[in-house]
Image (cartoon, rainbow, N blue to C red):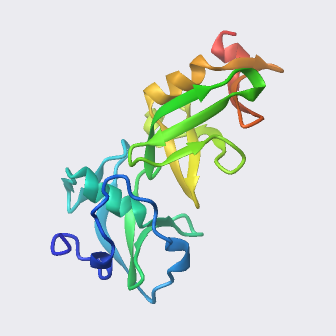
Amino acid sequence: MTGDFPIRGLEAISTADMPRRAPAPVDQWHPAHASPIDIRIDIDGNWFHEGRMIQRPGLVALFASILRREPDGSHVLVTPAEKRLITVEDAAFTGVSAEVTGEGRHQQVKVTTNVGDEMTVSPAHPLTMRASPAAGGDGAELAYVRVRGGLEARLGRQAFYDLAAAGTDEDGWFGVWSAGTFWRLMPASEAGV
């Protein structure tokens, strides 16, 4: 495997429990060697190496577990031995589901990503709306949630619909409650509320 994806130190990370792998302690790794690698996460959250889509979910999960966003906004795969700069066209992950439990101000929204990360929308994992290249340049805003560190997931269509189904109008805004906070999605006038 490391012959196809030459990242030194990767062989020390077990793949036995893929694809549900906990993130590695990448914030503690500060290798001296840094260089780019031809890995790209496209606008739809698909991973590519040298132009070919990575088909193995376990391999994508492994790479996701060592992914870190740098203070300058770049994305790197990092091991104790080196870090490799990759291209991310929008968000590193895709939110594939949004499960809502409870009601009103007491509800919780749990987002699950395409690589198995789960988080509750909260101040630690805020939900934001912003213009996105995935919107096709029409100026529409899409929903993002912080996953870990500076990494984000853009909510996919179904996850957004699940979220919107639990939405309500508060002070002229349509949004959703989670973890005691009201997260604005759009002006209520745009939502038809």
Which corner quadrant holds the C terminus? Answer: top right
Residue for point 44% across, 53% down: 92
Q: Is residue 138 visible?
A: no
Q: In the rendered picture of this protein, how many numbered marks are placed on residues? A: 0
Which corner quadrant holds the N terminus? Answer: bottom left
Relative vertical location of residue 140 with respect to residue 188 in this rendering, above or below: below
Looking at this view, is 68 or 72 the one in front? 68
Residue found farthest to the front: 16
* Residue 70 picture location, percent across and down: 54, 69
Residue found farthest to the right: 171
* Residue 22 picture location, percent across and down: 44, 60
Relative vertical location of residue 104 with respect to residue 45 in this rendering, above or below: above
Q: Is residue 34 left or right of residue 73?
A: left
Relative vertical location of residue 19 with respect to residue 3 in this rendering, above or below: above
Q: Is residue 100 left or right of residue 189?
A: left
* Residue 57 picture location, percent across and down: 26, 50
Relative vertical location of residue 38 with respect to residue 145 in this rendering, above or below: below
Residue found farthest to the bottom: 32
Where on the picture, by quarter, is residue 73?
A: bottom right
Residue for point 33% across, 73% down: 13
* Residue 95 picture location, percent across and down: 47, 39
Q: Is residue 56 left or right of residue 182?
A: left
Q: Is residue 55 visible?
A: yes
Residue for point 84% across, 21% down: 171
Where on the picture, by quarter, is residue 128?
A: top right
Looking at this view, is 17 or 62 the one in front? 17
Residue for point 41% across, 52% down: 89
